[in-house]
């Protein structure tokens, strides 16, 4: 179980500031979901944790700054599912998921029996065994996306970052993927930070939501606090209605706006 903390984290691309000083502390086993309109800075926060973009301020895992870790050690701590992963078309599903074991394999070494057994186990748990021998180029976008999640799971890092992990999935596989992440969190105490567009699903699965707008946090807290019609209208420019189910689920539904007269 690991904690992930952000202290005054700033991400900039040349002179464009994509993330304003961002401070947050994600508890071990907690699921934080970043929401916000396109360009709000969600991916930039995740990329900073993954070490793919530079940042100012400090990001720590269990109190130790990530920036001083070797890339290999970092990969053993943080697994990252990008928004649009590169898919090597000729690679088999099994070999692709095996890439998740790279941080544990020596420079000139090859994977161990344990690595292969673990990959097999992940494929079974994610119901992906039938794609083990298929080349990625022959799979549908949704099937590829599930293998990308499998690869991150095989990495066995205590912190899992998911950038819109379910955007290519149908509603059934969306639920299956999010349930899996939830199960890993419960069984292994994974700490999860995700960016998600589906606000209802974000509220169902995450413990806490943080709404970003132009790189700044404009609302944060439990789903019922963040998913308010006025807040969403202000920062997304949409008209929505928000319903509260008896079980506590907060349902966000877009409203049809009246046509111009
Ligand atoms: N590689 C880049 N170079 C320049 N600007 C970028 C780059 N990546 C993202 N940005 C800008 O940073 C801002 C935040 O982007 P991003 O983190 O991708 O937002 P989100 O994931 O919330 O849609 C946007 O204004 C985007 O145009
Ligand atoms: Mg993004």
Image (cartoon, rainbow, N blue to C red):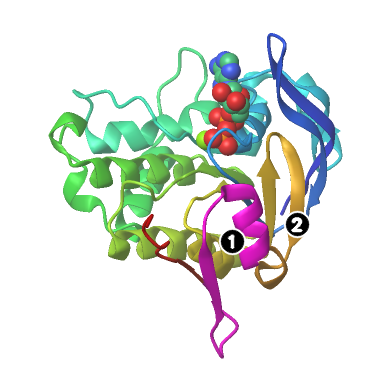
Residue 10 in sight here: yes
Q: Quadrant of residue 119?
A: top left
Q: Position of residue 141 (x, y in %)?
A: 24, 41
Q: Which residue, given by chain and number where applicable, does mark 2 sit on?
A: 220
Quadrant of the drawing holding the C terminus: bottom left
Q: Which residue sits at x=42%, y=39%? A: 115
Q: Which badge, 1 or 2, is on the more N-terminal residue?
A: 1
Residue that carries the numbered disc 1 in the rendered image: 185
Q: CA distance from mark 1 to mark 2?
A: 21 Å
Residue 227 visible in the displayed image:
no
At x 66%, y 63%, the residue is 230
Q: Which residues are magenta?
A: 228-251
The answer to which quarter of the image holds residue 70 is: top right
Give the left or right position of residue 13, taking residue 63 as reference: left
Task: Please say whether residue 34 is one of the residues in the magenta stretch.
Answer: no
* Label 1 element class: helix
């Amino acid at each position: 179980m690991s904690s992930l903390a952000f202290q005054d984290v700033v991400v900039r691309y040349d002179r464009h500031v994509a993330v304003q000083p961002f401070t947050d502390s994600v508890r071990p086993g907690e699921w934080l979901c970043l929401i916000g309109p396109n360009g709000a800075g969600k991916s930039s926060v995740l990329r900073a944790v993954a070490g793919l973009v530079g940042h100012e301020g400090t990001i720590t895992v269990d109190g130790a700054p990530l920036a001083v870790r070797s890339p290999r050690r970092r990969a053993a701590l943080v697994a990252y599912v990008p928004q649009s992963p590169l898919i090597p078309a000729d690679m088999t599903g099994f070999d692709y998921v095996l890439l998740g074991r790279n941080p544990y394999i020596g420079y000139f070494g090859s994977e161990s029996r344990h690595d292969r057994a673990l990959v097999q186990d992940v494929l079974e748990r994610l119901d992906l065994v039938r794609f083990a021998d298929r080349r990625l180029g022959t799979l549908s976008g949704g099937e590829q996306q599930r293998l990308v999640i499998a690869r991150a799971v095989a990495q066995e890092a205590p912190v899992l970052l998911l950038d819109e992990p379910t955007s290519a999935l149908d509603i059934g596989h969306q639920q299956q993927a999010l349930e899996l992440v939830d199960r890993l969190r419960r069984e292994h105490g994974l700490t999860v930070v995700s960016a998600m567009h589906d606000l209802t699903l974000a509220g169902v699965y995450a413990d806490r939501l943080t709404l970003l707008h132009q790189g700044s946090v404009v609302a944060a807290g439990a789903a019922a606090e963040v998913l308010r019609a006025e807040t969403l209208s202000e920062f997304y420019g949409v008209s929505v209605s928000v319903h509260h189910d008896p079980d506590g689920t907060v349902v966000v539904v877009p409203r049809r706006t009246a046509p111009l007269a």
